[in-house]
Image (tube, rainbow, N blue to C red):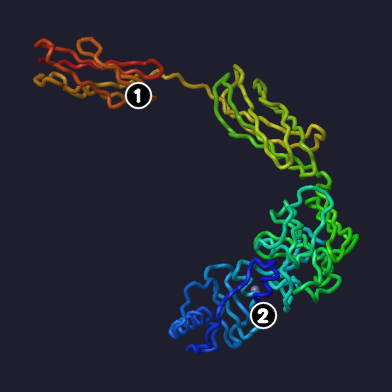
Amino acid sequence: MSAYYGENSFGVSSFVGNAVGWYTIPYSSGTCSYNTFATAAKNAAQAAGVSLSGYNHFVYFFPGISACGWAGLSNVGGNPSNSWINGYNDSYVISHELGHAIGMYHASSLNCGSQQIDDSCTLSEYGDPYDDMGASWIHRHLSAAHKYQLGWGKVQTVTSSGIYTIYPQETANTNTQILKIAKPNSGEAYYIEYRQPIGFDTSLPSNMTNVSVHVFGGAQSQRLDMSPDGNFNDSSLYDGASFVDNANGITITQISHSAVSAVVQVTMNGQTCNKSAPNVNLLPVSQSGSSGQALNYSVSVKNNDNSACGITSFNLSSVVPAGFNSSFNLPTLNISPGSTVSTGLVMTSGAGILDGSYNFTVSAADSSDSNHQSSTTGSYILFTPVPDTTPPIVSVTNPTNGAKITAANIIISVSATDNVKVTKVEISVDNILQVSDVSSPYSHKWNTKKISSGAHTISAKAFDAAGNSSVSSIQITK
Ligand SMILES: [Zn+2]
C-alpha cells in the first residue's frame, strides 16, 4: 500500500504506521456501528498501553460482517481521519480508503450516451476502471485528475491552440505529464493523461496505453469515453482520434504515441459564433418629476452572444410620449460576449403636459443584425407641485406670558411646527435679534442682568422653505 502511494507520488509521499491488536470489543456484529467500533478499538488499544497520539490516519480492521454493506469506508480528509476495513485485508481496498483519507473522492465515469461530452451526461460513482478510487479492483495508477489534486506530476495549463507532448504518468518526469484545459461552461477543467504499462499500470490493456480525458472540479474525477458506447474499458483516444467539446470550442487530437511520450494537438475557441438577443434593463424603472424636469435613468445592456463572437456594437433607441425628450449619454455600446455595459438616459418632460404616468420604451439592437434586439419599458410620472402657502405655527413656551423675571439667566424656549418643514426660528427681545436657530429644540439662554426693570417683549418668528413666516410674542416684567 505504501509502495503504491510511493510510485503514484514519484517518491514524494508514503505511509508509515503501526499495526496493533487484534482487540475484542463488546459489540454485536449484527449492527454496523462503525463509529462505536472505532471508539472501542481505540479505547482497547490505549488500555493495552498503546499511545495513539501523533497519528494522522486511523484504519480499523474487523472480520467481515454482513451488517456493514461495504468492503471499506472512510472519511474524506480529516486529521486524524478514520477508515474502516470490513474483512477485506486487501492492499487495493486499504489504498482506496486511505485515498479518501487524504482527500480524494471517487473515480467516476461520465456517460454522455453517443457523445463524448454534452450537457446531459450520467455520472457513475465508481465508473473509472483505471483508478484505485474507482472500480479497478486491482492497483492502477491514480488518474491525472487525482494526481493534480494531490500535487503529484508535472502539470501544464493549456490556454491556446498548439501541439503538446505528454509523458507517461507512471514515472517521474521533468516534462509535462498532465495537460489542464479549462472547461468554462461548467467551471471545471479537463485533465489529459498518457499511460504506459509501467509499475502498477503493468497490466493496463494495450488499448488504454493512450491519451485519456478526465473532467474534475474538486469532487469526483470523471473519466470520459472517447469512443462513446457506455463501455469505459476502451475509453482512451488512439492515433488520429479526437475529443471534441463543441460547447467550449475545444478539440484534442492524439497525433502519435510511443513508449516515451504522446503528442496531441489542442485547438481552442474553434466554435462558431451564436448570437442571441441582449438583455436590456432600466434603473429605476419609474420615477417622478415636475414639468420640464430632467430625470436620470441608467440603461444596462448584456451581450448574450457565445464567446466565439467578437465585441458587438449595440445601438440604443427610445420611443417617448409626445412632448417628452430623451437622450443617451452613449448612444452606442460596444460589449463583449457575456458582459454588461451601462449608460445614462436623460428624460425631460415638456411644458403644457397634463399630470399623469407616461411610459417610454428603450431598445438595444445589434448594429450588424437588428433582429438581435430587446426592449424594456420605463415610466415618467409627471406631477405639478402644489405651492406651500401655509405658515408655520410658533409660540414661546418659556417663560410664560406675564411672568415676573428674577433669575439672572432665563432659557427662552420656542415651539414651532409647519405643514412641510420649519427651516429657521428667530428669537428676539424688544425687537433685537438674540439668536437664529435652524434646528429643534429652538431655544436661547438669555442673560437678564443688563436689562432694565419693567416690561419687556420676547418674540419668536418661524420660517418655512417657501418663505412663509409667523410671529408670536409674550410680555414679561423684571
Ligand atoms: Zn470509496
On the image, numbered disc 1 is attached to which residue?
A: 418
Ligand 1 shows up in the quarter that is: bottom right
**Picture residue at 66% right of the left edge, 21% below the top:** 325
Task: State which quarter of the image contains the N terminus.
Answer: bottom right
Q: Residue at x 70, y 56 (%)?
A: 188
Given this view, does label 2 or label 1 mark the residue nearer the observer?
Answer: 2
Q: Residues within 10 Å of mark 2 (few under 14, many from 20)?
A: some
Q: Quadrant of the C terminus?
A: top left
Amino acid bearing label 1: Asp
Q: Quadrant for residue 314, please give it.
A: top right
Q: Is mark 2 within 8 Å of ligand 1?
A: no
Q: Nearer the viewer, residue 435 or 260?
A: 260
Which SS class for mark 2? helix
Q: Position of residue 382 (x, y in %)?
A: 56, 25
**Residue 45 appears left or right of 220:** left
CA–CA distance between discs 2 and 1? 88 Å
Disc 1 element:
loop
* Residue position marked by numbered label 2 in the rendering: 91
Q: Does residue 439 appear in this view?
A: yes
User: In the image, is 411 to the left or to the right of 216?
Assistant: left
